């Protein structure tokens, strides 16, 4: 039987919002018989459990109550009603500054955080070398943290949280902070922590990380718990929430239709700063991405088939058209692409007034992350290469993955290990 290590029972958190600062004082001392505030429920009767050794993610839109829930679990905030029980030593990495005294030096804050978790000074001394090595901020560790850059601050905060050897790690969006090298080191440590059987509860807007690391996901919206389940199930519901299409009482048929509307709302993610040029003898008049089910979207799950479609109108005769696409990463590096000439899918000459629909279907092998799609319509006229229409960085595509390999794309290797 699974051992419950965190139990949240009917937790609500209500804030009093005062129109003026003086109204807070009046209310505190009961100087007026009527209330001078409006109530705002950050959490509404939320319940869930986290079992020992689980990695549980909490997702939701901004203002859904995710960070409030983590603060209540860690004891930073008290619930208005409900109960929290935690069976284990917690290390938490919340928003920048939480748990640190800005006037203290880095070293002093290491001892402060370790003591708050329950370690003795001698135990912290034993872990100090690992913490300082991981943070790698040099002599700045002896300076007040108020002088730190945000990058140095998060390095120290994560180094303390992950190396203090807690039974439960609670993280609020911190894995996406800092330079790419530090992020890489954080993810490696995060994976080691998970592999050692520790319990992790974390909030993230990075759906690829949620899909990759989480055993279970809890979805919050405007303080309410909408559901919990597998990462895929909750991510699908989250997409509905994002576009206002979620209906808790919907039938199965309604849900199918809602999913279609959600994907329609998600469809392009068109870049308003698309670079466009060409002779315009022909033009790309529409484009879309379809998932394996033929639903229009700009979020593709790694390992599934997808189709890039472009609609083309021909305004003047085009003797040898070539249709193309390519993917870039967000830094502008061209990752992969193809065209009808490479694929030996040659088109007949096209006449003015012709209309064509071009489809590129393939399996998504790119690593999880954000990419930009570019489209092209080119050709040859009397031996000269001609650009009719190009659209650079026209659509953002999100690849959702729970398994990334080295580099930009996955070789999809099949591995066998035998005795010889």
Image: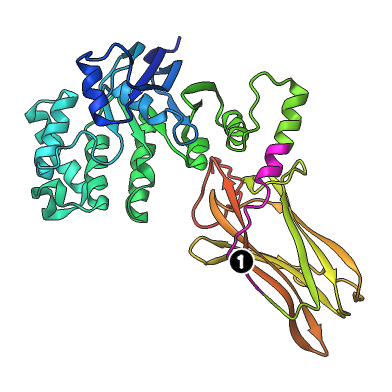
Q: In this view, does 25 lie to the left or right of 253?
A: left
> Would residue 287 be counted in the magenta stretch?
no
**Residue sitting at x 16%, y 30%:** 114
> Would residue 271 be counted in the magenta stretch?
yes
**Residue sitting at x 53%, y 42%:** 403
Relative height, residue 130 to residue 23 (above, below): below
Q: Is residue 360 left or right of residue 369?
A: right
Give the labeled residue for mark 1.
274
**Residue sitting at x 25%, y 30%:** 21
Relative height, residue 244 to residue 282 (above, below): above
Name the image colouring: rainbow
User: Is residue 45 among what the camera can see?
Assistant: yes
Q: Where is residue 247 in the image (x, y as percent from the top left)?
A: 65, 24
Q: Where is residue 367 in the image (x, y as percent from the top left)?
A: 55, 51
Quadrant for the N terminus in the image = top left
Q: Nearer the viewer, residue 91 or 20?
A: 20
The boundaries of the magenta stretch are: 261-276
Q: In which quarter of the image is residue 377?
A: bottom right
Q: Nearer the viewer, residue 195 or 326?
A: 326
User: Is residue 197 among what the camera can see?
Assistant: no
Relative height, residue 307 to residue 30 (above, below): below
Q: Is mark 1 on a helix, strand or loop?
A: loop
């Amino acid at each position: 039987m699974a051992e419950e290590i965190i139990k949240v029972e009917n937790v609500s958190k209500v804030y009093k919002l005062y129109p003026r600062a003086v109204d807070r004082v009046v209310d505190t001392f009961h100087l007026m018989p009527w209330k001078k505030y409006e109530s705002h429920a950050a959490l509404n009767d939320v319940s869930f459990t986290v079992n020992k050794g689980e990695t549980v993610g909490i997702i939701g839109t901004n203002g859904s109550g995710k960070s409030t829930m983590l603060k209540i679990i860690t004891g930073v905030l008290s619930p208005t009603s409900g109960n929290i029980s935690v069976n284990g030593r917690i290390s938490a990495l919340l928003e920048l500054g939480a748990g640190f005294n800005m006037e203290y030096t880095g070293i002093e804050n290491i001892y402060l955080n370790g003591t708050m978790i329950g370690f003795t000074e001698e135990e912290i001394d034993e872990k100090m070398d690992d913490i300082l090595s991981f943070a790698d901020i040099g002599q700045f560790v002896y300076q007040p943290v108020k002088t730190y850059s945000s990058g140095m601050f998060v390095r120290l905060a994560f180094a303390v949280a992950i190396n203090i050897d807690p039974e439960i790690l609670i993280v609020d969006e911190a894995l996406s902070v800092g330079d790419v090298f530090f992020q890489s080191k954080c993810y490696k440590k995060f994976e080691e922590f998970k592999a050692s059987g520790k319990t992790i509860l974390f909030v993230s807007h990075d759906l690829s990380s949620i899909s990759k690391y989480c055993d279970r996901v809890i979805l919050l919206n405007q303080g309410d718990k909408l559901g919990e389940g597998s990462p895929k199930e909750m991510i699908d519901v989250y997409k509905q929430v994002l576009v206002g299409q979620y209906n808790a009482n919907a039938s199965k048929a309604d849900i199918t239709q809602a999913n279609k509307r959600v994907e329609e709302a998600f469809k392009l993610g068109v870049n308003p700063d698309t670079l466009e040029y060409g002779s315009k003898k022909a033009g790309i008049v529409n484009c879309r991405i379809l998932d394996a089910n033929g639903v229009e979207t700009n979020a593709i799950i790694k390992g599934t088939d997808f189709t890039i479609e472009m609609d083309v109108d021909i305004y003047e005769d085009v003797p040898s058209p070539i249709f193309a696409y390519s993917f870039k990463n967000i830094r502008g590096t061209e990752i992969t692409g193809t065209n009808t000439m490479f694929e030996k899918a040659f088109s007949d000459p096209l006449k003015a007034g012709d209309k064509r629909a071009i489809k590129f279907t393939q399996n998504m092998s790119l690593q999880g992350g954000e990419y930009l799609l570019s489209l092209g319509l080119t050709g040859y006229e009397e031996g000269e290469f001609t650009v009719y229409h190009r659209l650079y960085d026209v659509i953002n595509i999100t690849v959702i993955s729970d398994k990334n390999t080295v580099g930009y794309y996955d070789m999809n290797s099949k591995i066998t290990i035998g005795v010889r």
